[in-house]
Amino acid sequence: MAFLDPSLAERDPEIARLISEENKRELESMRLIASENYASRAVMDATGSCLGNKYSEGYPRKRYYEGQAVIDQVEELAIARLKQLFGGASGVAPDSFHVNVQPYSGSPANLAVYFAFLQPGDVVMGLGLPAGGHLTHGHTVSITGKYFKSVPYGVRREDHRIDLDEVRKLAKEHRPKLLWCGTTAYPRTIDFAAFRSIADEVGAILAADIAHISGLVCGGAHPSPIGVADVVTSTTHKTFRGPRGGMIFCKKEHAAAIDKAVFPGLQGGPHNHATAGIAVAAHEALQPEFKAYARAVVDNAKVLAQALVERGFTVTTGGTDNHLMLLDLTNKGVPGKVAAQALDKAGVVLNYNSVPFDPRKPFDPSGLRLGTPAVTSRGMGKAEMLAIAGWIDRVVAAPADAALLETIAGEVREVCAKFPAPGIRVG
Ligand code: DSN
């Protein structure tokens, strides 16, 4: 027993030190990666609990191992809360759709959709990766592009918005069995109803991947695809602000196919500690504060995008409707990667990203992607967004100026010190 008793710091000082360094980094920098957030202390406590010790293959009341009295309640609570939350936000009855909380993350959730509805070689359509789609929407390097016939659609050259006429034309020509709507780097509202009508015209299953925007959807800051799409997938750790995990919502008629695809089709035992974290995140998202949070994420993104436009940055599509924006740095004469790495040194953390029709390669693209979910969780607002725009402007103007980067890192630390990061304890 004694061997297993010591604390992390006593047992493994090296890992304890690294966690403490990451705590400090997350506290002292501006977290602008659009897919990241700060989970609450409560979510982290649930996720770090003993529930991770338990194996629970199957679904509540239909398990393959004994000892599920508590786990069944955890999973049922997570599902009930998500139904209440997303049903309410979507204007549909909580019992009119099915929820599966077992996918390990967003990619496994998406793979379950393929496994539930398609055979290898079937046609799938999704937004191409270079236009802001996800790898699992049929990109060539992904299993979804290798095992299925992928027909990507894009955005318009003039305004970089999804070209629904092109989607319809391609769908009529290629008759996909599965049509994805959903994005990872697209700053505008998704018109789920328009995708529904295209899917109906060609008899396709419509899948909405709301991994980036699920917190905005349940917080009322983006329209919901629930009740519109046949199936909706999401991660749980982005704007939803839960633990690392995945979830799938679907029409009741698809419940058995989705459940079978997740388990035993793709996965073994669910991560019960993550399920508990999802239940806690859903509970938090049911509070009035979460609606205000979702609205503030979008408001902050709009302020930041506008401030960058005023400083001469090319913001693709001219702005944003959601939590993120894409900057094309071509007119600044600085590649995205150079800018992202310099900004990281200055404590402004985001990612380099391809922009639509990017002439440069994905590993050395023209743009930056940045978003406001995490800084908004810290309580930052308009003044901080304007400060961020100023820092980005100064760094992009002189990315090799080490003294400047150090000065800005100090300014960033000063601002961060005024906004505690949820869930992070130092020491
Ligand atoms: N890695 C996620 C993102 O950053 O958008 C998508 O999987």
Image: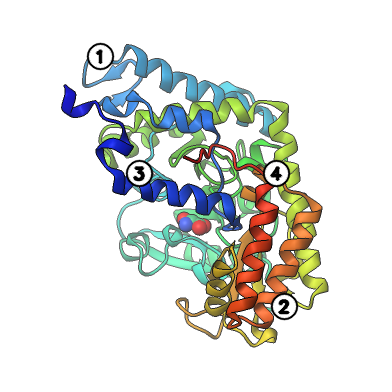
Q: Residue at x 57, y 49 (%)?
A: 27
Which residue is pictured at 56% across the width and 74% down the height? 342
From the viewer's perspective, is residue 298 above or below residue 257?
Answer: below
| Residue that carries the numbered disc 4 in the rendered image | 223
Q: Which residue is mark 2?
A: 158
Q: What amino acid type is highlighted by mark number 2?
A: Glu
Q: Mark 2 or mark 4, which has the lower sequence index? A: 2
Whichever of callouts 3 and 1 sits on the residue coming sooner in the sequence is 3
Q: Gap in Å between the C-alphas at discs 2 and 4?
A: 25 Å
Which residue type does callout 4 highlight? Pro
- Relative image position of residue 404 (x, y in whole percent): 65, 76
Towards the viewer: 274 or 376: 376
Q: Residue at 40% x, 51% y: name it.
A: 107
Question: Which circle's residue, 3 or 2, is located before the other in the chain?
Answer: 3
Q: For the residues carrying marks 1 and 4, which lies nearer the camera in this image? A: 1
Q: Earlier in the sequence, mark 3 or mark 4?
A: 3
Q: Residue furthest right?
A: 310
Q: Can you tell which mark lies on residue 134?
A: none
* Location of residue 109 with respect to 76 vertically, above or below: below
Q: Amino acid at mark 3?
A: Ala
What is the spatial separation of the Cα atoms under label 1 and label 4, in whole angstroms? 40 Å
Whether ligand 1 has any atom under 8 Å from the Cβ at mark 2 is answered as no
Q: Are marks 2 and 4 in contact (CB under 8 Å)?
A: no
Q: Where is 251 relative to 367, above or below?
A: above
What residue sits right under mark 1 in the picture?
67
Q: Counting other residues with Cα less than 10 Å from the Cα at mark 4, is it few (<14), some (14-19), or many (20 or more)? A: some
